[in-house]
Image (cartoon, rainbow, N blue to C red):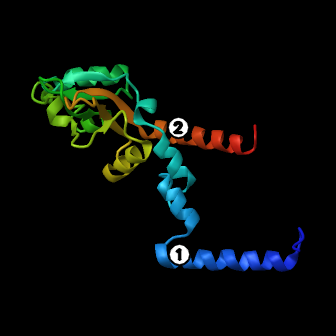
Amino acid sequence: MVEIGDYAVTIVVMVTVAVAAVVTRQLVGVSFFHSQLTARGLSVEEGRETGLLRESRVGEVMSRRFHAIGRHTNIAAIKELLSNEPDADIVVIDEQHRLVGLVAFADIKDVAFEPGLDPLINAADVARKSPVSLRADDDLTTALRLMDAGDVARLPVVADDGSEQPIGVVHHAAVVLAHNKALLAARREERGR
């Protein structure tokens, strides 16, 4: 008769589990637990932080407050806009309201103080062309990866309907803030607060 707390049985069970784990790893390539997590769409390699970023969407953190200007808008109008709002998100669009690019003060600083150039330069000339844009349903991991790859602090967000019409701008700082809030909430949940 086996009694609870029988150390011989405990040792046999531990050895059996260890052997089963080794056999499973040899046959499948990962542990049984790891394969169960993968089957549920969870990744052990990514880590908790990446998982939190994957759960959050660009639409949750993007700013819908931006100035849309036509690509033929002259530099004088852009300078005036930036003098009133230095950190403004200025989105340059074409005649069909499709995204052309973004303009920030850094993009016009070389020509900003040359008044003779005002009638010669327009928004399309100074805009950072945006072959890269985000959709509201993209996760924050994608946003950070694209920002890092392009070495930019903000990216335009375009409509999901294929029109390429801008609907917002997402900032690196907003992504980081959302990530930090999610981490704090997860830690509070772990501690039962």
Marks 2 and 1 close (CB-CB < 8 Å): no
Q: Label 2: which residue?
A: 178
**Quadrant occupied by the C terminus:** top right
Quick check: 119 left or right of 31?
Answer: left
Q: CA distance from mark 2 to mark 1?
A: 37 Å
Can residue 44 be spotted in the picture?
no
Total numbered badges shown on the rendered structure: 2
* Category of crowding for the residue at label 2, using alpha-carbon neighbours closer than 10 angstroms: few (below 14), some (14–19), many (at least 20): some
Quick check: 51 left or right of 158?
Answer: right
The nearer-to-camera label among 2 and 1 is 1
Can residue 7 be spotted in the picture?
yes
Residue 124, quarter of picture: top left
* Category of crowding for the residue at label 1, using alpha-carbon neighbours closer than 10 angstroms: few (below 14), some (14–19), many (at least 20): some
Quick check: 182 left or right of 71?
Answer: right
Q: Nearer the viewer, residue 178 or 107?
A: 178
Q: Measured from the top left, where is residue 21 in percent x and y?
A: 60, 74
Earlier in the chain: of badge 2 and badge 1, it is 1
For the residue labelled by badge 2, is the local secondary structure a helix, a strand or a loop?
A: helix
Kindly identify the residue that appears in the image at 37 percent across and 23 percent down.
64
Which labelled disc corresponds to residue 78?
none
Q: Measured from the top left, where is residue 80 in percent x and y?
A: 28, 20
Kindly identify the residue that appears in the image at 38 percent across and 50 percent down.
145
Residue 20, quarter of picture: bottom right
Q: Label 1: which residue?
A: 25
Q: Measured from the top left, where is residue 29 in percent x and y?
A: 47, 74
Q: Amino acid at mark 2?
A: Ala
State whether residue 6 is above or below residue 80: below
Q: Amino acid at mark 1?
A: Arg
**Quadrant occupied by the N terminus:** bottom right
Q: Nearer the viewer, residue 111 or 148?
A: 148
Residue 162, quarter of picture: top left
